[in-house]
Image (cartoon, rainbow, N blue to C red):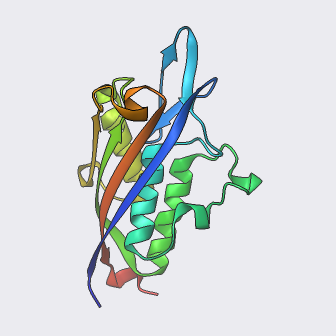
């Protein structure tokens, strides 16, 4: 048995009017032409947390978020993605794994995310029962190229390391 495993996750959601923008479990004010703008999705559409969840589940070979939290189920309509992340932590614990670290990048032309990153790190860390110094969140633009550069959507990538935790083996 290999004691360490890595996972990669990616998510993207379209920006739309009339929704709250939630990234990393943090609400970020985003107004375009006097209209609130957020991400479109069945849950809160938190692309950052969704990418992290897919990385964690993938590392443990436990499927993906669509398998565990299908967008066809009403129970997940408007769901708080941080709560879903807590559930992914529980799932991998059942298989004897714990999260070692998470490294994530948000790709968005706007809004500027730097002021919110410390709170995002804390929220994600809390969901996985780790410290904020085990979570890295970065933000970048695509220099006005592609759908993120045109402010049509926001994307996120995440990688994580999980390890076999003898204390929680199945």
In percent of width and height, residue 85 lies at: 49, 56
Q: Seen from this angle, which residue lies furthest right?
A: 74
Question: On screen, 164 above or below 105?
Answer: below
Q: Nearer the viewer, residue 15 or 59?
A: 15
* Left or right: where 80 falls relative to 130: right
Q: Seen from this angle, which residue lies furthest bottom?
A: 1
In percent of width and height, residue 9 lies at: 39, 58
| Quadrant of the rendering where the N terminus is positioned | bottom left
> What residue is drawn where x is 51% and y is 72%?
63
> What residue is drawn where x is 51% and y is 15%?
31
Q: Seen from this angle, which residue lies furthest front?
A: 146
* Left or right: where 75 falls relative to 104: right
In percent of width and height, residue 35 lies at: 58, 14
Question: On screen, 100 above or below 104?
Answer: below
* Left or right: where 43 falls relative to 3: right
Q: Seen from this angle, which residue lies furthest left?
A: 133
In percent of width and height, residue 45 lies at: 56, 42
The quarter holding residue 6 reads bottom left
Question: On screen, 90 above or below 104?
Answer: below
> What residue is drawn where x is 59% and y is 61%?
66
Q: Tell me how many marks there are.
A: 0
> What residue is drawn where x is 45% and y is 75%?
93
């Amino acid at each position: 048995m290999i004691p360490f495993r890595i996972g990669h996750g990616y998510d993207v959601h379209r920006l739309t009017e009339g929704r709250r923008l939630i990234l990393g479990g943090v609400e970020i004010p985003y107004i375009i032409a006097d209209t609130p703008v957020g991400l479109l999705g069945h849950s809160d559409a938190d692309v950052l947390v969704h990418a992290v969840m897919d990385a964690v589940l993938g590392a443990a070979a436990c499927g993906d978020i669509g398998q565990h939290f299908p967008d066809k189920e009403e129970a997940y309509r408007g769901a708080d993605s941080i709560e879903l992340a807590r559930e992914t932590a529980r799932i991998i614990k059942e298989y004897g794994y714990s999260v070692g670290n998470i490294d994530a990048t948000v790709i968005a032309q706007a809004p500027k995310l730097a002021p919110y990153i410390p709170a995002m790190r804390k929220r994600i860390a809390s969901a996985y029962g780790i410290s904020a110094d085990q979570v890295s969140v970065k933000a970048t633009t695509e220099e006005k190229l592609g759908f993120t550069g045109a402010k049509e959507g926001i994307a996120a990538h995440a990688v994580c390391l999980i390890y076999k935790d003898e204390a929680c083996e199945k």
